[in-house]
Image (cartoon, helix red, strand yellow):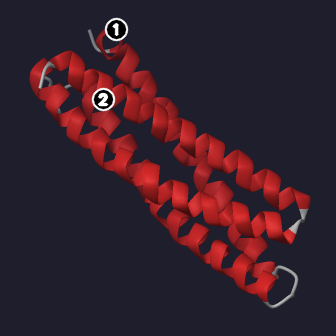
Amino acid sequence: MTYLTLKLIHILSAIVLFGLGSGTVFYKVMADKTGDHAAIAATSKHVVLADWWFTTPTVIIQPLTGVLLAEQLSASFGDGWLWWTVLLYLLTGLCWLPVVVLQIRMRDIAADSLAQGRPLPSIYHYYGKIWLWLGVPAFFGMIGITTLMVFHNSLWS
């Protein structure tokens, strides 16, 4: 595969990963703020689906295309920017994995309590706080990764 094709796939995948992550946070937080139980249940369901359909493939595509691009650039882990990028990606992933588990739990809690005609239990809101705070380092990790991808030559030359 040519360098430019790999780069295009890598960039489009990064856009989907970052954009979808930001979008799902926005819609879930806004749905939770409404207090509308049906809206919360529906949004939680769609956030989980979006992660499976879009985020999971991009999480796989990013390192694959990244390794291929690094090979074509003859980059090595001795290059500071590449080492930091991989580290930030792994740390971001360590935040994302529990977020996925929490999203699934919140989806199930919202759907079950709606079906039973009960208000959302406090555990839903507790999970929501943890979910949001795990997203903060993930968000800044993605900003750092993107910054390193754009400026790597000027930062380490």
Q: How far apart in space, not on screen, are marks 2 and 1 (Cα)?
A: 23 Å
The answer to whether 84 is drawn above or below residue 138 in the figure is above
Which of the 4 image quarters holds residue 125? bottom right
Which of the 4 image quarters holds residue 61? top left
Would you name the residue on which mark 1 appears?
154
At x 61%, y 58%, the residue is 47
Residue farthest to the bottom?
A: 116
SS for callout 1: helix
Query: How many numbered circles are shown?
Result: 2
Residue 133, horizontal then vertical, whole percent: 66, 56
Would you name the residue on which mark 2 appears?
9
At x 15%, y 24%, the residue is 75
Residue 140, horizontal then vertical, whole percent: 55, 38
Residue 137, horizontal then vertical, whole percent: 56, 47
Identify residue type, mark 1: Ser
Callout 1 environment at 10 Å: few (<14), some (14 to 19), or many (20+)? few
- Nearest the camera: 30 or 130? 30
